[in-house]
Image: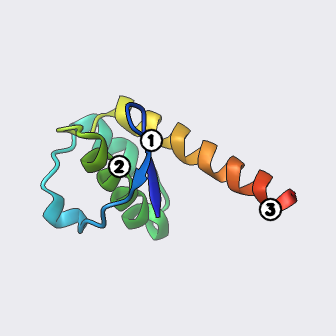
Amino acid sequence: MQCFDSKQGVVPAVKAEPQKAGIPWTHEAKKLLNRVPPMMRDIVREIVEDSAIITGYPKITVDYIRKARKIAHRRIDERKEATLH
């Protein structure tokens, strides 16, 4: 798996346990995460925290979640495009 770093481009993903990552979440970011369907919440949390570790973000904020979501959507679109060709 790979992640996108705005400074470095695509970099290898680092697997991290969400509880062990130790990245603090703002109250607003936690509220946004709680809007994710329960069956997807742990996956989303892990993806956001992994991405934050790779990109060097010290805290998960609503702005960071939005940025990570844009990156994820871009990757999904790229994969869809690749499968069409």
Residue at which label 2 appears: 51
Residue depicted at x 29% and y 48% = 54
- Choose between 34 and 49: the one closer to the eye: 49
**Is there CB contact under 8 Å for labels 1 and 2?**
yes
> In the picture provided, is 38 more to the left or to the right than 16?
right
Give the spatial CA distance, label 1 vs label 3.
23 Å
> In the picture provided, is 17 more to the left or to the right than 22?
right
Q: Earlier in the sequence, mark 2 or mark 3?
A: 2
Which quadrant would residue 24 be assigned to in this image? top left
**Nearer the viewer's eye, disc 2 or disc 3?**
3
**Nearer the viewer's eye, disc 1 or disc 3?**
3
Crowd band around label 2 with a 10 angstrom C-alpha radius: few (<14), some (14–19), many (20+):
many
The disc labelled 2 sits on which kind of residue? Answer: Ser
Q: Secondary structure at mark 1?
A: helix
Give the percent coordinates (x, y) of residue 10: 47, 46
Give the spatial CA distance, label 1 vs label 2.
7 Å
**Is there CB contact under 8 Å for labels 2 and 3?**
no
